[in-house]
Amino acid sequence: MKSGPGDQAGQRAAFFANVGHDLKTPLNGIIGFASVLLADLAGDPERVRQVRMIYTSAQKLLARIEAFLDYTRLEAGQLQLRPEWILPGDFLRQLAEPLRPEAEQSGMRIEVRSQQAPSRIRTDARLLGRVLGELLTNAVRYGQQGRIEASVRALPQCVVGFELRDEGIGMAAEALGRLRESLSGTGFEGLGLGLAIARQAAGALGGRVEVDSEPGRGCVFQLVLQLARGDIEP
C-alpha cells in the first residue's frame, strides 16, 4: 500500500528529527566548550574575539537546524499551536534588538514603529517570532547602507500587518514575480530556507507573507495575520 502525502511528510519529519539530533549533539559540545574558553581567556581580548566568533557561529547554525525542524513539523502537521497574549510592538522590538549590531556593522539602522499597533493580540508567539525573525534577518542580510523599518499596525476586520522595509538593491520584476508565486503557493523557486519557513509558519498562523520591490528601491515584506475577533484588543 502506498503512503499518502501526509504519511510521507510525517516520515520526513521523523527522519529529519533524528538527523537534527545527530547534528545538534556535537554543536552543543562546541558551544559548551567555547563558553568555557571565553571564561578562561578573559584577559586576552583578541583570542576572546576569535572564540566568540566560534560560539556565535555555532549558535546561529543551531538556530537554523531548529528552524528547519520546525518547517518539517509544520509540513507534517505535527506542530501544535500554543496561543498566548503578546504586545505586538514590544514583541517586534525584542526580535529586532539582537540584530542591531549586525545591521550597524553593515551601515544600517533598524527602526521599529508601533504607533498604530493593537494593544494586544493572541497568537502562537514562537511561530510569529519564527516568521518575523526570518524576515528581519533577510532584511539585514540583503539590505545595504540605510534604514530597515519594522512596523506593526491594526488593519480592518481583525487583521494585523507586520511590515519589514529595507533600502537594499531591490528585485527585478521577473524575480519578484517568481518569489510572489512561491510565497502564495507550494513551490520553492526564489525561496531560501528562511522564506520557506516564514511561508509555512505564516500559513499555520492563518496568515500570509507578501512582498513588493523595485530595483534600487529595496524590498517590502509583509506578514498579514487574520485573527479572530476575541484575539485582538485595540
Image: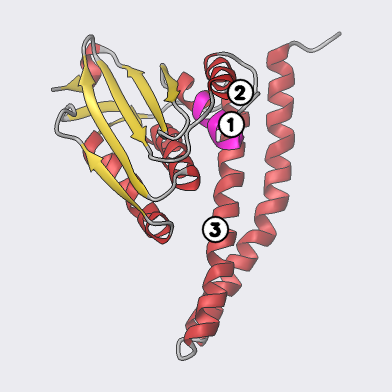
Give the answer, above or below, for where 140 lies relative to 221: below
**Residues under numbered marks 2 and 1 in contact, where contact means CB atoms less than 8 Å apart:** yes
Q: Circle 1 sits in a helix, a strand or a loop, which is it? A: helix
Query: Residue 215 magenta-drawn?
Result: no
Q: What residue is shown with label 1?
A: 71
**Residues under numbered marks 2 and 3 in contact, where contact means CB atoms less than 8 Å apart:** no
Q: Nearer the viewer, residue 78 or 132?
A: 132
Q: What residue is shown with label 3?
A: 59
In the image, which disc is placed on residue 161? none
Q: Amino acid at mark 2?
A: Glu
Q: What residue is shown with label 2?
A: 75
Q: Nearer the viewer, residue 97 or 206?
A: 97
Label 2 – label 3 distance at C-alpha? 25 Å
At horizontal 23% and vertical 9% (from top left) the residue drawn is: 157
Residue range corresponding to the magenta coloring: 192-199
Label 1 – label 3 distance at C-alpha? 19 Å
Label 2 – label 1 distance at C-alpha? 6 Å
Within 10 Å of disc 3 (Cα), the crowding (few <14, some 14-19, many 20+) is some
